[in-house]
Amino acid sequence: MLGRVFKAYDIRGTYPDLLTDAMAFQIGAGSGRFLLDDAAGAGDTTPMMRNVVVGRDMRTSSPKLSKQLIKGLRGARASVIDVGLVDTPFIYFAVNHLDCAGGVMVTASHNPPQYNGFKISRRKAKPVGEATGLADVRKHAAMADPNKLTEGDTTVEERDLWDAYIDHVRSFIDLRSRKIKVVVDASNGMAGTMVPKVFGEGGSAIEGLEIVELNFDNSKGEFVHEPNPLVASNLDQLRNTVVQQNADLGICFDGDADRCVVVDEKGRIVGCDHLTGVLAKHFLAKSPGAPIVYDLRSTKAVAEEIEEAGGEPVRSRVGHVFMKQVMAEKGCAFGGELSGHFYFEDNFNADSGAIAMATVLTVLAERRRKMSTLVKPVARYVQSGEINFENEEADDALAALKDDFLAKAAIDELDGVTIDSFAREGWWVNIRKSNTEPLLRLNAEAKDKDTLARVLSNIAPLLGRRVDH
């Protein structure tokens, strides 16, 4: 039963049928053992390396799960610093700010309210995924016996780090005396707590900023719309309000406020890869020649924009585990992912919805142009969006694709199969397997609509049955 809630990048399930209070204790014990062993293995034995930061989101099950998680952590001989009701990037900040062994956030991110789960971070807020420790956590958790684990001399300390966190996020914003009006949809999630604290009620803490608030009430743990900004229908209210309010832009956060999506002044959704291309130039102005990382599903225009600005474009596998690893290994100044995660060197290489918002506002102010005008040059190619295909023989389908195109295009397997004929024929595609379902995920791009249509008509029949969800 325990194994059913462990996913590729985190732990998640419906509460209390799949994910139970007893499991939260086990996961706490497994996490504590892994995090303390990880710190000791790195030769770090400072007193703070016995501490694990714990935070939680606004879901009604989060207080109970947090309480049991903390018991489990203490049973594994970890002391706990409880930072309370926070957004997930707050945990990344706290782990680094306090120099702890790691952190655990109780959240189910963008899932419906009946879900909950845990996101685990190691030292320096490095993510813990299946290949970077989550398998060990699962193993240790399965062996955790509450009758044999004692808290010993461990402690639990409740600590308020909001002042330090606020100072950190505000260091990324500079409106240069320009007035900006932004509609923010908190999706009834943790942005409803974070945005007023960081930016002030209605933007009052930042000179020149006006925030129109949507769905900021997170007291009931319920959602007016699904807290997933990647689903276009979840942005309808935001898009309409931006136009009605004559705002400069809109920003929608997911449930735990580590991801966000931007809407321009015309109410049009800005692709997260297009936004990466826009923001990259801002960071390259500060760090000339720096590497900038982007996920390999992104438009070709991202790499072109980075090169034009004198930077080094770096492709990455999809997922925050891989993006953060590349950020650290390559010394990247900035990174952007199609999923709405944005990564910052000056934020310990971690992603942050709050800092993404601060940076977007800063770029809008310093460039003194409309959001649509900034994005238009980057949105110069035609994209398919992600298309899913049901296929029980995914490996065979990918192998056949490689054989078909081996002599016709460049092929790489950084993440799935990427077939690139952009220089010669003006198109490229990436096909990846789902981590959780028997699906193939296709992303394609071309220089014009006719080319994209032709490529899709040739490749789609080879991938299985199209699934529209």
Image: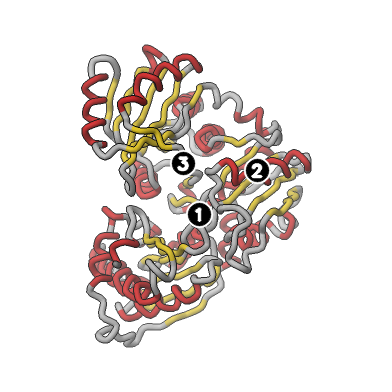
Q: Which residue is mark 1?
A: 110
Question: Depth-wise, is mark 3 or mark 1 nearer the camera?
Answer: 3
* Dot label at residue 236: 2
Q: Nearer the viewer, residue 364 or 467?
A: 467
Amino acid type for the residue under numbered disc 3:
His
In the structure shown, which secondary structural element does the residue marked by tag 2 occupy?
helix
Say whether disc 3 or disc 2 marks the residue closer to the N-terminus.
2
At x 56% / y 46%, what residue is drawn?
229
Among all residues in the image, which is located at the extreme front?
A: 465
Near mark 1 (Cα within 10 A), the count class, few <14, some 14-19 or many ≥20, is many
* Residue highlighted by disc 3: 469
Q: Amino acid at mark 1?
A: His
Q: Are marks 3 and 2 in contact (CB under 8 Å)?
A: no
Q: Is residue 262 above or below residue 464?
A: below
Image position, residue 161 (x, y; %): 55, 69
> Would you identify the image quadrant in which residue 295 lies?
top left
